[in-house]
Each structure stands twice: as structure tokens, then as C-alpha cells.
Image: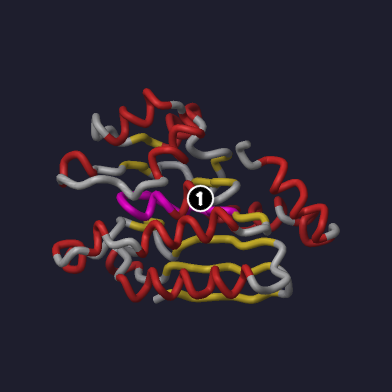
Amino acid sequence: MIDLDRDGRLWTITLNRPDKANSVTKQMLEQIDAYVAEAAESDVAVLILTGVGKVFSAGADLDEARAGLATDPVWERLSGRIAALDCLTIAALNGTLAGGAMGMALACDIRLAVPGAKFFYPVMKLGFLPQPSDPGRMAALIGPARTKLVLLGGQKLLTDEALQFGLVDRVVDPDALIPHARELCADCLAGKPDVLRGIKTLCRPS
């Protein structure tokens, strides 16, 4: 349900559970976490995170969410590991992004999205807190008030509004999503690893 494609220094992690809207189980999250940990110890220059089908991820698998996955620390561990990577990270969002899965995308350097996607994080309605780093990362992108619009107001953002807010960086047609992500990473793949690491460090909040 989690695929990893190693193409030299470009790795692509794909959520592959389209029949369940790519909702994630704890096992799937731990598998992604293991791949990201492996990437951190390798010479990977670019990591792309994407999904199969028309939904990037509906968040936690419902059965496992009821059993406690919604507040499991695995989400925070994974997003923190993605954020700490020295390589370029791109969330190529093939569709709707919901719930805890938002953390993976927020932790990436660049977020691409397809037309017609929805973005929402209904923690207020469901009655639990978001993962600790997610509100701060979201606020850094779209501002505190708009973050409260999503987290407290329960608002669903459509692609155009998400682009206007700064939650996503570019809207790309579905057929061009992965080719465009690969185009964006060409300089990182061709450039010096120490320059890549240096730019990432300089771009991090002080």
C-alpha cells in the first residue's frame, strides 16, 4: 500500500490504497517513516510524496482512527522527519488532502496540487487536537487567522483558494503532476549536495 521508487537520487513515495481513498493505517505510516529515515541516511537529493487515484489521502483509516490512530505520535514523528530532511521534498498532491495526512504535506518544501482538490483538517468537529507541529507549519504558510479558519472553522479549501492562501504553491493538471515535479527537481539532481543542504538550512526559520 506504500510504494517506493528509487530512481538514482530521486525517490518517490506513493500512497497506493485508492479503494480506501488512500486512508492510512499505522502500518502504512510506519512504512513511510522508515523510507524517509532511509532517505535521511542516503544521498537522496529529492523526495516526492504522491498518491494513486483521485485522492491524495483521506487521513486516518476510520477503523484505526476509532482505535486511537488519530492521535498517535507516529504522525508527528513522520512529519518531523520529513521536515528535517536535507533534500528537496515535494508533495505532489493528486487530489484531496484531509485530516492528519495534512502533516506530511505541510512538512514538505513544495506543494503541488491538481484542480478540484479539497483541503480540510476537521479536528474541531472530531474532538481532538491536531498533531503539535501542524498548526505552526500551516500558520507559517497561510497565517494564523486562515489556519484558525481551517482548524477551528472547519472550512474546506478548494484548490484555487488554497493556492491564493499559499497552502499550495502551484496547480498542475493531473497528467502533468509528476512530470512537473520532476522538472522542478532537475537543478537539485544536477547540483552539489552541499549547496542543496546549505540552501535548505538558509530557508529554515531562524
Instruction: Classify mark 1: helix, strand or loop.
Output: loop
Q: Is residue 91 left or right of residue 61?
A: right
Q: Position of residue 28 (x, y in %)?
A: 37, 73
Camera-side residue: 92 or 195? Answer: 195
Q: Quadrant of residue 87?
A: bottom right
The residue depicted at 80 percent of the width and 61 percent of the height is 193
The scheme the figure's colours follow is: secondary structure
Camera-side residue: 80 or 24? Answer: 80
For disc 1, the marked residue is 107
Camera-side residue: 13 or 113? Answer: 13
Tell me the quarter of the image containing the C terminus: top right
Which residue, as the protein is rendered here, is positioned at the far front? 206
Q: Position of residue 37 (x, y in %)?
A: 55, 71
Q: Quadrant of residue 39?
A: bottom right
**Segment colored magenta:** 90-103
The residue depicted at 61 percent of the width and 62 percent of the height is 47
Which residue, as the protein is rendered here, is positioned at the far top? 145
The residue depicted at 28 percent of the width and 62 percent of the height is 72
